[in-house]
Amino acid sequence: EPEVTQTPSHQVTQMGQEVILRCVPISNHLYFYWYRQILGQKVEFLVSFYNNEISEKSEIFDDQFSVERPDGSNFTLKIRSTKLEDSAMYFCASKKDTLYPQHFGDGTRLSIL
Amino acid sequence: KQEVTQIPAALSVPEGENLVLNCSFTDSAIYNLQWFRQDPGKGLTSLLLIQSSQREQTSGRLNASLDKSSGRSTLYIAASQPGDSATYLCAVRSGGSQGNLIFGKGTKLSVKP
């Protein structure tokens, strides 16, 4: 069964550095999402992406964050200047169409030192 | 603002028991509700998706019901097995959103052999 794949599985970065998290959504899916989960807390929505543009973003998704779909297969989340509180598990998700379920990747654990 | 609550936070049952996990949401204007399973350190596996017009969905030993007017959903697991041990998350897509999901904190299930 097709899967959403995320790389790397674990990223350790110094505070203030830029980090790029990568995702390959399921190939025929049209809607793409990033979520994060701080240890012990709820999964939180960050941003949704459709038709090559951001369709919705949360208060968490400030100017430090950006997303790109550079080549029709990858979907990336960039954090420009990381902070300690950015440490979390970041999940990418995709879905085929509006009435279909979202499918999640295994996540990238981001640790900011 | 939509809030999703899951009760209980943790549940331990002997193998073979039938069990019910509860999810409640504050705003009944939802598009759909999705149940996920999360294993430790892993991503989210979609279990069932219920559209707002539906009352229930079934997949194998799992049955999810939705009572939109009262803001509740239940996940029924029949004949539980040790392999069912995981955290179960409930998430709703609110009516005004572009598809982002709002999650509960989950119920951590432990099925003892």
Image: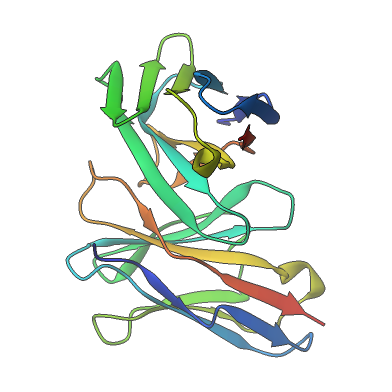
Left or right: A21, with A80 as reference point:
left
Up-down relation of residue B42 to residue B45 (above or below): below
- What residue do we see at 47% from left, 20% from top? B74
What count of labels does the image hold?
0
Report the quarter where the N terminus of chain B lies.
top right
Q: Which residue is most to the left? A: A28
Q: Which residue is most to the top? A: B70
- What residue do we see at 23% from left, 46% from top? A98
- What residue do we see at 31% from left, 66% from top? A3
Left or right: A59, with A106 as reference point:
right
- What residue do we see at 81% from left, 73% from top? A84
Up-down relation of residue B49 to residue A61 (above or below): above
Colouring mode (rainbow / by chain / secondary structure / one colour): rainbow
Report the quarter where the C terminus of chain B lies.
top right
Left or right: B113, with A105 as reference point:
right
Q: Position of residue B84 (x, y in %)?
A: 51, 39
Can you tell which quarter of the image residue B76 is in?
top left
Q: Position of residue B98 (x, y in %)?
A: 35, 47
Q: Position of residue A103 (x, y in %)?
A: 35, 55
Can you tell which quarter of the image residue A62 is in?
bottom right
Viewer-proximal residue, B102 or A64? B102
Q: Position of residue A27 (x, y in %)?
A: 21, 71
Viewer-proximal residue, B56 or B33? B56
